[in-house]
């Protein structure tokens, strides 16, 4: 979606769109009041349609799935454990990174009221860290797929294990090319 | 990310293939701030426009209420001045993006002068309107809507003044001109609001 206040140039284009809409409404209203109302409705709808267009071609396209991997002889596993996870069975013989996404609701994410949810994730991470001394445990982003993306960009893994629900599993599978299975 | 590690840190130099880190927040704070700002402005102007439509359509108050007249011609000239000032603001921003410092300075100065002309002209319009807020619903909402916009123009002019001073002091360059960009966004927003005010209050 186009943000009319993203840049000065976008704001100028928005102003021109508003001027064109206003001129059309004025002309229609002088012909007939109800025609003016109809044009006003159409102009507002047109403005919303214009705002929904992507300002840069390809900007709205989804990102390609993230490719990850490790060098030969090294096996790394990324484990996603939602807050509240009390125990995990880790694969033997692999370097393991456990990520606890600080899951939030949409409203909490938009308003930045994430402190309590992050506190929950930190408590879970601390408990898992004490329980799994061989693994590294981190708190991740509020979106599990994004937390996995972040982790993979610093920790190349061969496999992702998910201790969450099916929805979380599907969301992560969409974002990465490596095998994703249930922990 | 906060790490709770009880093991030796992993040797990242052994990694094979991890791409560069990226900004991972779902919504950038600056973007959220801008949306909240827009929302607050929409609510502010929305409240005044609601009062306007209530008085004019629901209450059926004649617009303008006889024997008063709205200075449509002066407001039209003012509108043209304000729209031209947006064009010069755009010119200023485009100039500094290309490294044309004098183009930016001229554009900002012209924008400031035209904004000042608009505001002075509006003050004279108020003085010669022939009515004031104590004379009924029509003058009240007229002064409230145009006055609210006038306040925004005044804020915009203050920003423009600082921008112009900074421009003449050489604070902006092709690489660093965020101050011009942000001020420009605000100025165009104020102009877009004036188009709504002008269309509803003076023309329709």
Image (spheres, helix red, strand yellow):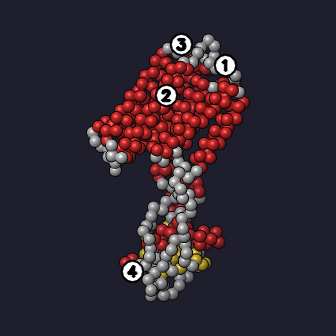
Label 4: few (<14), some (14–19) or many (≥20) C-alpha neighbours in 10 Å: few
Quarter of the image where the C terminus of chain B is located = top right
Q: Residue B31, percent across and down?
A: 49, 50
User: Are discs 4 and 3 located on one and the same chain?
Assistant: yes
In this rendered view, identify the residue nearer to me: A149 or A182.
A149
Residue in the image at 58% along x and 77% along y: A180
Q: Residue A9, percent across and down?
A: 46, 44
User: Are discs 4 and 1 located on one and the same chain?
Assistant: yes
Residue in the image at 55% along x and 35% along y: A19
Instruction: Report the disc number at residue B80.
Output: 2
Q: First in sequence: mark 4 or mark 1?
A: 4
**Separation of disc 4 and disc 1 at Cα?**
79 Å
Residue in the image at 62% along x and 71% along y: A170
Q: First in sequence: mark 1 or mark 2?
A: 1
Residue B199 makes an appearance in the image: yes
Q: Which residue is mark 3?
A: B130
Q: Residue B173, percent across and down?
A: 32, 46
Q: Which residue is mark 1?
A: B62
Q: Please state the total of marks drawn on the protein image.
A: 4
Label 2: few (<14), some (14–19) or many (≥20) C-alpha neighbours in 10 Å: some
**Separation of disc 1 and disc 2 at Cα?**
27 Å
Q: Which residue is mark 4?
A: B14
Is the C-beta separation of discs 4 and 1 under 8 Å?
Answer: no
């Amino acid at each position: 979606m186009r943000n009319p206040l993203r840049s000065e140039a976008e704001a100028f284009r928005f102003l021109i769109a508003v001027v064109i809409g206003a001129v059309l409404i004025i002309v229609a209203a002088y012909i007939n009041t109800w025609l003016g109302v109809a044009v006003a409705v159409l102009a507002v709808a047109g403005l919303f349609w214009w705002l929904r267009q992507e300002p840069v071609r390809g900007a709205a396209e989804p990102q390609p799935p993230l490719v990850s991997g490790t060098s030969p002889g090294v096996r790394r596993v990324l484990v996603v454990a939602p807050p509240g996870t009390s125990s995990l069975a880790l694969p033997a013989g692999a370097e393991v990174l456990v990520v606890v996404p600080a899951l939030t609701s949409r409203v909490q994410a938009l308003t930045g009221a994430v402190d309590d949810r992050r506190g929950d994730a930190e408590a879970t991470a601390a408990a898992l860290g004490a329980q799994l001394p061989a693994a590294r445990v981190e708190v991740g982003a509020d979106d599990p797929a994004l937390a996995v993306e972040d982790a993979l960009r610093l920790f190349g893994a061969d496999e992702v294990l998910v201790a969450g629900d099916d929805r979380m599993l599907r969301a992560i599978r969409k974002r990465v090319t490596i095998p994703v299975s249930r922990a | 990310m906060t790490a709770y590690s009880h093991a030796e840190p992993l040797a990242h130099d052994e990694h094979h293939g991890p791409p560069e880190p990226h900004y991972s927040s779902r919504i950038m704070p600056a973007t959220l701030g801008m949306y909240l700002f827009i929302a607050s402005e929409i609510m502010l102007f929305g409240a005044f426009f609601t009062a306007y439509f209530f008085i004019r359509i629901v209450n059926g108050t004649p617009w303008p209420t006889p024997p008063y007249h709205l200075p449509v011609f002066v407001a039209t000239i003012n509108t043209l001045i304000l729209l031209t000032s947006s064009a010069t603001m755009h010119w200023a921003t485009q100039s500094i993006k290309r490294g044309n410092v004098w183009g930016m300075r001229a554009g900002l100065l012209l924008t400031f002068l035209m904004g000042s002309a608009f505001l002075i002209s509006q003050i004279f319009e108020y003085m010669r309107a022939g009515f004031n807020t104590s004379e009924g619903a029509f003058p009240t909402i007229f002064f409230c809507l145009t006055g609210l916009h006038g306040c925004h123009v005044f804020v915009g002019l203050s920003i423009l003044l600082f921008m112009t001073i900074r421009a003449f002091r050489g604070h902006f360059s092709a690489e660093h001109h965020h101050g011009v960009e942000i001020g420009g966004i605000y100025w165009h927003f104020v102009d877009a609001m004036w188009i709504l005010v002008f269309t509803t209050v003076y023309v329709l």
